[in-house]
Every structure is written in structure tokens, then in C-alpha cells.
Image: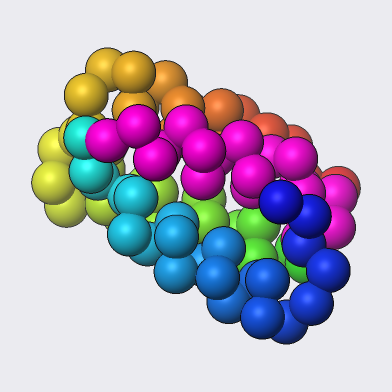
Amino acid sequence: MRIESVDDRILLSCAFRYALGRRTYVVSSVVKTILDNWDKLQEHERLRFKKEILEHKETWGNLGDNYDEENWDRILSKEDK
């Protein structure tokens, strides 16, 4: 999926919030889409993704199964431009 419109951004945000903390295959798809579009995302969007991931981990103690955590960590380790 390429982020090309406001609707695409809204859908990605919804998918992100759905996937965060779940133990499901969709986590890897959402993370892949975010990372594939990282340079197209606005800085505040990138920071919001990171902030919400960290807040979820702090609140719930984990981000899902180990595989899920590894995927979310790929976003956390991504540098902002």
C-alpha cells in the first residue's frame, strides 16, 4: 500500500491502532506498510506512531507476542529525518 491521500493516512492510522497490542498476523502487515511509507509520512505522524507504541508497552507491559514486539521495535528503531 502506498500512502497517496488523506484517506490512505486515515486507514493506516486505523489499522495501526487496531493492530497495536494484538497477537495477530496483521501486525507485520501494518508495520511493513508504515515502514514502506516512512519517508512519505509527516514527522508528526512518525512521532505519533512511536509515542503510541511506547505508551502501549508502558501501560500493558508488552506489545503482543515476541514476534509482534520485534515488529513494533522496527518502527521504534527507525530514525526520523
The extreme left residue here reads 60
Q: Which residue is drawn at the image coordinates 61% and 59% (left, top)? A: 47
Q: Which residue is drawn at the image coordinates 24% and 45% (left, top)? A: 21
Q: How is the image coloured?
A: rainbow
Residue 27 % position (x, y) = 40, 38
Is residue 58 in view from this perspective? no
Whether 5 is drawn above or below 60: the answer is below
Relative depth, front residue between 63 and 37: 37
Q: What is the total number of numbered labels drawn onto the structure image?
A: 0
Whether 12 is drawn above or below 25: the answer is below
Is residue 34 shown left or right of residue 55? Answer: right
Relative depth, front residue between 38 and 23: 23
Whether 75 is drawn above or below 41: the answer is above
Magenta residues (range) = 24-41
Is residue 5 in view from this perspective? yes
Q: Which residue is drawn at the image coordinates 23% and 43% (left, top)? A: 22
Residue 42 % position (x, y) = 78, 66
Residue 35 % position (x, y) = 69, 39
* Magenta stretch: dominant secondary structure: helix
Residue 55 % position (x, y) = 31, 54
Q: Is residue 65 magenta-colored? A: no
Relative depth, front residue between 74 and 15: 15
